[in-house]
Image (cartoon, rainbow, N blue to C red):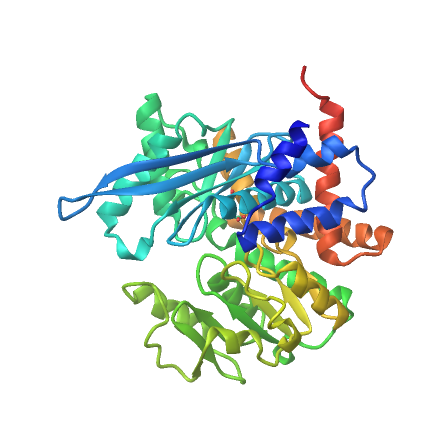
Amino acid sequence: MVANAIQSSVHMTTDPTYQTALQQYDRAVTHLKLPEGLVEFMKWPRRELSVNFPVKMDDGSIRVFSGYRVHHSTVLGPTKGGIRYSAHVNLDEVRALAMWMTWKCALVNLPYGGAKGGVVVEPKSLSLGELASLTRRFTSELILLIGPNVDIPAPDMGTNAQTMAWMMDTYSMTVGYSVPAVVTGKPVNIGGSLGREEATGRGTIVCMLEALRHKGITSSPKDISVVVQGFGNVGSFAAQRAYDLGFKVVAVSDVTGGYYNPHGLNIPAMREYTNRSPRRTLEGYKGDCDQITNAELLELPCDVLIPAAMEGQIRGDNASRIKAHLIVEGANGPTTPEADDILDDRGIMVVPDILANAGGVTVSYFEWVQGLQEYFWDEDEVYRRLERILVRAYESVVSTQEQYGVNLRNAAQITAINRVAQATITRGIYP
Ligand code: GLU
């Protein structure tokens, strides 16, 4: 009865991202013979907080912002997941992203459950001082929910290492002593891990290499063209890593549009340009390339497409025009279930988000472990361990794929969900 009540109230979502996450879950669990109540329990968020809070702006006015934090699952350990600043974020989207964090952590065997947070704000429209005030106030609103053994936030879209420094400082000031392990993705000078900033993009490329190997593609990297949508926390580092390994990165994009050169782009020059530009975008970049739209970029002829921007980019209405042979999801939820079916029919392989972008949370875990031990590793050690974890996760997904005869998305979800299910059974239902 209770389960049905939950289902009818939450199932009504109109948010396409949450619809995607729930549909993916429904598809995966049909392959697992799990008790119905357990399937229901793992589907819905464990707890959620919505807050509305005031911030004093530079001009003296007071603005009220809305924020959310969702803990999807606490079965495998404290909850983990980023905080997103975006004008479009909403509670259902955060629920979806928290759910994906649960599967992502389980898939790479991290001792965490999934969480996510968000504030409805366009961060580029705020001054640095306003962002600091907003972050500090939001952290104090979350204080009951976060902690180094409870829930550990990290950067996501629209947030970065500086945001984490403010969160860590606010939490520490409140409890009266420094608690670096309350967040990850911090600046290195206050307990961040080497390699964390580039970890998600780097991990995406580790997965791309595994996928190429599994597809039996042995061409030299210079003959393999790569398109990257997004040039932020994930895309810029994925593009850089692909470029460093000798791949031909033919197009990248950000909110200002796409930049294309079929002979390959100068990624280091583009990264330098965004680092110098006031809004950190590619707007006005005058290198050797043509300007295209984000929609055109997705449909370019290429070998590998890395959507590393946001959700819902590859959908039923454009999936049939995708020309890439391989898609490696740097973003969370870039492909809808409808598009998955079309890509499947067309034989286009998709390395799913919970595997392809798990590098970020994996190095977050390394940061947390290093902080708690107060013993820090060098960058090579971080990269070596990251690669080992991702390759092992990739192999476990391939073995599930063979066992169940499904695509990589279903295989990754089945692997992860089953781990959470078995842990729930082992722990038992309280009381
Ligand atoms: N926001 C990132 C993600 O979606 C990282 C989360 C974390 O490091 O906790 O995976």
Residue 427 in the image: above or below residue 187: above
**Res. 167 visible in picture:** yes
Q: Quadrant of the C terminus?
A: top right
In the image, residue 290 lies at what x, y percent? 44, 84
Splitting the image into 4 quarters, where does residue 401 fall? bottom right
Residue in the foreground of this view, choosing between 13 and 205: 13
Asked whether 198 or 100 is in front, the reply is: 100
Residue 314 locus on image (x, y percent): 59, 66
Counting from the top left corner in percent of width and height, residue 130 is at 24, 46
Q: Measured along the vertical axis of the image, is residue 257 above or below residue 197?
A: below
Q: In which quarter of the image is residue 218?
A: bottom right
Q: Which residue is drawn at 60% across and 60% down?
A: 329
Residue 326 pos. (x, y %)? 67, 69
Residue 388 can be seen in this image? no
Closest to the observer, 279 or 162: 279
Q: Is residue 239 left or right of residue 161?
A: right
Report the residue at 57% width, 79% height from top. 300
The quarter in which the N terminus is drawn is: top right
